Image: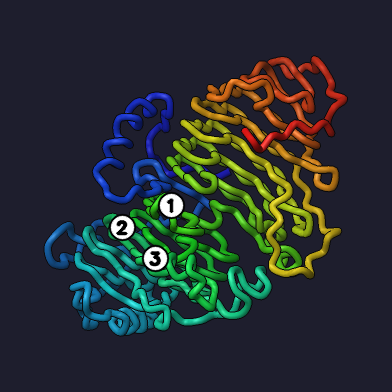
Amino acid sequence: MVETLPVGRFQLQQQRLELKRWIPAFLSSHKTLFVLLWIAAFGSVFFWQWNIGGSGFSIFANVGPGRPMPKMRPFAFNLTDFGGVGDGVADETAAFERAILAISKFGKRGGAQLNVPPGKWLTAPFNLTSHMTLFLAEDAEILGIQDEKRWALMPPLPSYGYGREHNGSRYGSLIHGQNLRDVVITGHNGTINGQGQSWWKKYRQKLLNHSRGPLVQIMWSSDIVISDITLRDSPFWTFHPYDCKNVTVRNVTILAPIFEAPNTDGIDPVAIKSGWDQYGVAYGRPSRNILIRNLIIRSMVSAGISIGSEMSGGVSNVTVENVLVWSSRRAVRIKTAVGRGGYVRDITYRNLTFDNARVGIVIKTDYNEHPDDDFDRKALPIIRDISFTEIHGHGVRVPVRIHGSKDIPIRNVTFRDISIGITYKKKHIFQCAFVEGRVIGTIFPAPCENLDRYDEEERLVKLSAAQNVTDIDYDI
């Protein structure tokens, strides 16, 4: 598996007390509560490792006040060289387009870097090019133009059929790229701001005729690095690498309001997806070999980390470790439904902490949203080989809810070293239905009767004869 870059030892137990003091103070100083999904100090999400060695930091280009911007490519340009103003009023679209056209000519010479200096840079969507670094200075903020007429329309995603929210064309992303190689978006924690408030309002009022677009979307590309920036207020999904290889996301902060900001997923895949029903099956691109680690996450309306429900191309070999989920509706979730087909398998959750969550672990097999009525009702997903180890926390109402079905049973689930403090004093809070698996050693709360019992030495203690017993209570 992938090794992380040195970020220090992630000591959740020692940090929890500090977080309890820091988080309320942070939130109380803001008029709008934000979902702090990724924290720069420890955030790093890896989809196989890509080494950016050789791009030294010894040469600097000074651009106005503030910290000097490192030169990471053989050639570097400033947005102001192409007519950029940075006052938050001028339309900077043409400046970005001219700059990226110039950079595209340096691909065979090691590529070039576009520096975005401090200021507010209002722009319509623009496309990146290969062998490019987009560097956002400290106090630089790229702002998305709110007039949707300025956002180009694109065909629906191939694995989503006719469209995600509407049939037909969809809006593109603010920052977009297709068929690229060697692209870096980084900085001194500059910001890319989608200004999604108008999009969310129009979506709720049903005033949009096309599916909303992401903030940053890279498609059919490889060797992509996103690091040391803030992404906020996306119209839809925030960062969406689609059918890409060798993608690294690290030290990224993603912000959106806790409420009334629909579908502003932080990273897809961290809501890991691979296509919707028959369209995802036909497209046939699995999401696999994914490592998610060292995160602090909050989600009041969905889950901290999700797999599915659009997983029809398959999801496998995923590791989630060293994660704190706090004050959330759900902590980690796998969701699917009849008609999806595909599979979710070889999933490892390790060293997770839940701090005040309504439900801790969720596997749900009846998430019945479909692109149309032509889905194959005989296409049944396979859910198997999932392990949960070193899962701790407190203030959790339902620690585990694994809801398989006769059509979609859940196989080979393992629990080990589980201790989750509960808030709801009811007997059946470890809920199961149509699940087969095992518990190793003693865990708290007591597991459901569907699971086999093993001692700490992994010697069989008791076989379950009740895998199909249903003990699901959504009223809790």
Secondary element at image label 3: loop
**Which kind of residue does numbered mark 3 sit on?**
Gly
> Which numbered marker is on residue 56?
2
Q: Which residue position holds label 1?
A: 259
Give the answer, above or below, for where 20 lies relative to 287: above
Report the Cα–Cα distance between label 2 and label 1. 41 Å
Cα distance between the residues tagged 3 and 2: 35 Å
Find numbered disc 2 in the image and state the secondary structure of the residue it sits on.
loop
Q: Count residues near mark 2 (Cα–Cα under 10 Å), then give few for <14, some for 14-19, many for 20+.
A: few
Whole-percent x, y for residue 260 in the image = 44, 56
The mark tally for this picture is 3
Q: Which amino acid does label 1 sit on?
A: Phe
- The vertical placement of 77 against 192, above or below, is below
Residue with the mark numbered 3: 196
Q: Does residue 304 appear left or right of residue 409 in this picture?
A: left
Left or right of residue 87, residue 75 in this image: right
